[in-house]
Image: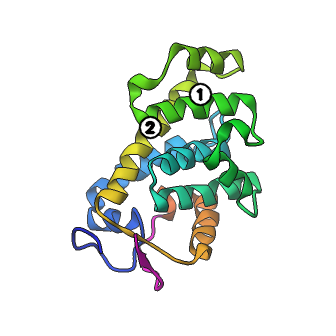
Amino acid sequence: MAHIQLPEGLPGIRGPMAFSPETTKPLNLLVDQLLWAPDNTLSQGERELIATYVSSENDCQYCQTIHGAIASQWLGDTDWSLVNQVKQNPETAPISEKMKALLAIAGSVQKGGKHVTPEQIDRAKGLGATDKEIHDTVLIAAAFCMFNRYVDGLATWMPDDTSFFRSRAVTICEKGYADSATTAPIKTAKTV
């Protein structure tokens, strides 16, 4: 049960966003720019992997599941095996060395910004990461620490059925976050 009275039938971040529409628009615009905007050298799937990994490290079930579904949708990972491998250990996952280096940075940001080391930055740059990609990795990781704490700090719930996440992933990949922010409730849910 949520810590405050949230609209019923809206899982994860969707409940708090419906509760506080004045903060929803800027949050959705931020996540659209970070994850969905096509004018970035990191693919949408790669950016979603960063969000998924940080959410997993923060043990935020809703965020790691929805962003994992979106990453899988972008990357053609129909059985979610790639996303699961990244969450378990990015260093052994079948992703680029540059992405492994960026996820190491994201993991350090998740622990605290001062955990990012010059060696991590040098590694990423040595593997071809640009300053913009490093910037975006840090910002995505920091933003998802906030989003994860928003979701879990209010004790929101999530659906039992993974088809909810698959369906939302398709919609978000087609429309982005701000344009797909509907408030239609769903029927099956469990307390997180």
Residue 153 placement, left or right of 186: left
For badge 2, the amino acid type reads Gln
Crowding near pointer 1: few (<14 within 10 Å), some, many (20+)? Answer: some
Front position among marks 1 and 2: 2
Amino acid type of the residue tagged 1 in the rendering: Glu
According to the picture, the residue beneath numbered tag 1 turns out to be: 133
Residue beneath the point at 56% across and 25% down? 134
User: Residue at coordinates 59% horizontally, 47% vertically from top-left?
Assistant: 48
Q: Name above or below for residue 62 compared with residue 35.
A: below
Prevailing secondary structure class for the magenta stretch in the rendered image: loop
Q: Residue furthest bottom?
A: 187
In the figure, is residue 126 to the left or right of 164? right
Quadrant containing the N terminus is bottom left
Image location of residue 157, percent across then percent down: 39, 71
* Residue for badge 2: 110
Q: Residue at x 66, y 40 (%)?
A: 90
Q: Nearer the viewer, residue 101 or 173?
A: 101
Q: Is residue 147 above or below residue 110?
A: below
Relative depth, front residue between 33 and 187: 187
Residue under the image location 44 percent in, 25 percent down: 115
Q: Position of residue 93 (x, y in %)?
A: 73, 42
Sort mark 2 into few (<14), some (14-19) or many (20+) by Cα contacts within 10 Å.
Answer: many
Residue 184 belongs to magenta span: yes
Q: Is residue 102 left or right of residue 107?
A: right
Q: Secondary structure at mark 2?
A: helix
The answer, for residue 182, to whether it is visible in the render is yes
The quadrant of the rendering that contains the C terminus is bottom left
Q: Which residues are magenta?
A: 181-192
Rendered view: 144 above or below 18:
above
Q: CA distance from mark 1 to mark 2?
A: 17 Å
58 is within the stretch colored magenta: no
